[in-house]
Image: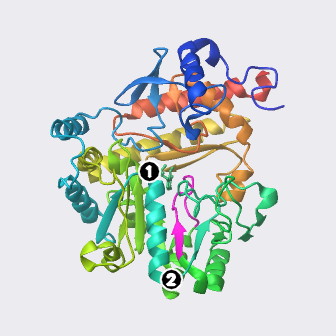
Amino acid sequence: MMAGGTSRNPHGSYESETPASRSAFERAAAVMPGGAKGAYYYAPYPLFFERGDGSRVTDVDGREFLDCANHHTAQILGHNHPAVCEAINSQVGRGVVLGGPTGAETELAEELCGRVESLERIRFCNSGTEATLHAIRLARGVTGRSRIAKFEGGYHGSHDAVEISVAPPLEAAGDRVAPVPVAGVRGLAPGATDDVLVLPYDDVEAAVGLIEAHASELACVLLDPKAGILEPVEGLAEAVSATASAHDVLLIVDEVVAFRLARGGWQQLNEITPDLTTYGKLIGGGFPIGAFGGRAELMDRLDMREGATGFHQSGTFSAHPVAMAAGLATLKELTVEAFQSLEQLGECLADGLSQVAVRHELPLSWVVSGSLFSLYFAEHPPRGYRDLAGCHREWNALLFHQLIERGYYLSHSLAMNAFSLAMEPGDVQGLITAIDESLTALAPSTN
Ligand SMILES: Cc1ncc(COP(=O)(O)O)c(C=O)c1O
């Protein structure tokens, strides 16, 4: 029988305890299709939040949760961190946007370039989507080639070049070692899929072979080292980097999420030197942001002093002073010791889950990477998209709602969770206990 039983309300006591969220959602959905944005929605309706403080968020029905989602991983310090609030207030006090550079963008750029060796130059935009769009456009412009390679299951934002083979139905996805590009949404430009070479994330030989076979058409390889928080298999990043470099294909590493892992991000831990890197989420301290940067020789095509190079990047709100100030204040808190504390929280979770999982019939597995974690219903942690597609994803919503009942707010897919510096080991212990109790409640034998 399905976990949780077929007769039981899959949302538990959710509806009876969240009347204010329900009416807020009904009002929202009358003017915004399905509510505010796609990623917020889960059945029967999402929680609406009233406030956040430190590690906690409070919903509009007055219930408090330990926030293990941290706004799609962006809130690495937790909510309302005093240093970030001070930086925001100080910038707002001087005017929000002033129609010219303020120097706040220079400070954040210096901080990022100082942390990441491969970043000689950087430019800011408003989202991770824009960051990958501009990085790919630069790669195409510089190489004069139109196709890009990306990994199956990798999400890089919502523009046409990358909404391909993010979560394709297996029946359309082709061979495991030579995946077919599948449009992720309707309405992409005709030919968008033809421009993408899809690589398997869990097969080094096949990925390298595909890049080699198509190298003369490829502008870049786009690698998200966390593709939904999955570690690349051993040797993948090194082999892809070496192959791309040997064929003058640019390597773009997408650290929109993975920058959470260390002071200099994922590439520092893995000793990979990309040509370009994209950023977003945490570097804005909770404000909309994106950035892309890398080798000066590539990025300087955007230098207006060079005259008409044919390259351009701008945007009304790019390098927004408040986002710059909040991002800088956030990064200043992210010392080596801060990353150690975050990692300890992750280790504590992994230890606790290994003790809990053996006690239950339901096959829980997990990937913990620094302060990031995802939970899966599968015998083994997935290594690539095909494994992910084979997980019992129909059980995720049941566990999500069980955890809500116990005061823990995770990403509703359970696949993109993150601890914050505002948390303590006791919070993680509480989460482990809540998962243990939830699995008991969901066990087939209890139905
Ligand atoms: C790895 C990665 N790249 C790019 C993006 C797109 O960023 P944004 O949502 O800011 O457009 C995301 C968003 O989740 C992401 O996880």
Direction from residue 330 to residue 359 in the image, left or right: right
Residue 271, image x and y in percent? 40, 71
Q: Is residue 367 above or below residue 254?
A: above
Which residue does the image show at 28% across and 60% down from the upper left? Answer: 112
Q: Nearer the viewer, residue 388 or 381?
A: 388
The residue at which mark 1 appears reads as 370
Highlighted magenta segment, given as a residue range: 220-233
Residue at image coords 48%, 55%:
129
Against 77, is 178 above or below? below
Q: Main secondary structure of the magenta part?
A: loop
Image mark for residue 393: none
The image shows residue 187 at horizontal and vertical percentages of 67, 54
Quadrant hosting residue 167: bottom right
Please name the residue that numbered disc 2 is placed on.
144
Residue in front for this viewpoint, 428 or 109: 109
Task: Label 2, secondary structure: give it.
Answer: loop
Task: Check disc 2 and give the amino acid type.
Answer: Gly
Whichever of labels 2 and 1 marks the residue nearer the N terminus, that label is 2
Q: CA distance from mark 2 to mark 1?
A: 38 Å
- Where is residue 367? Give x, y as percent: 56, 49
The 10 Å Cα crowd at callout 1, few under 14, some 14 to 19, many 20 or more, is: many
Horizontal and vertical percent position of residue 287: 35, 43
Does the segment drawn in magenta span residue 232?
A: yes
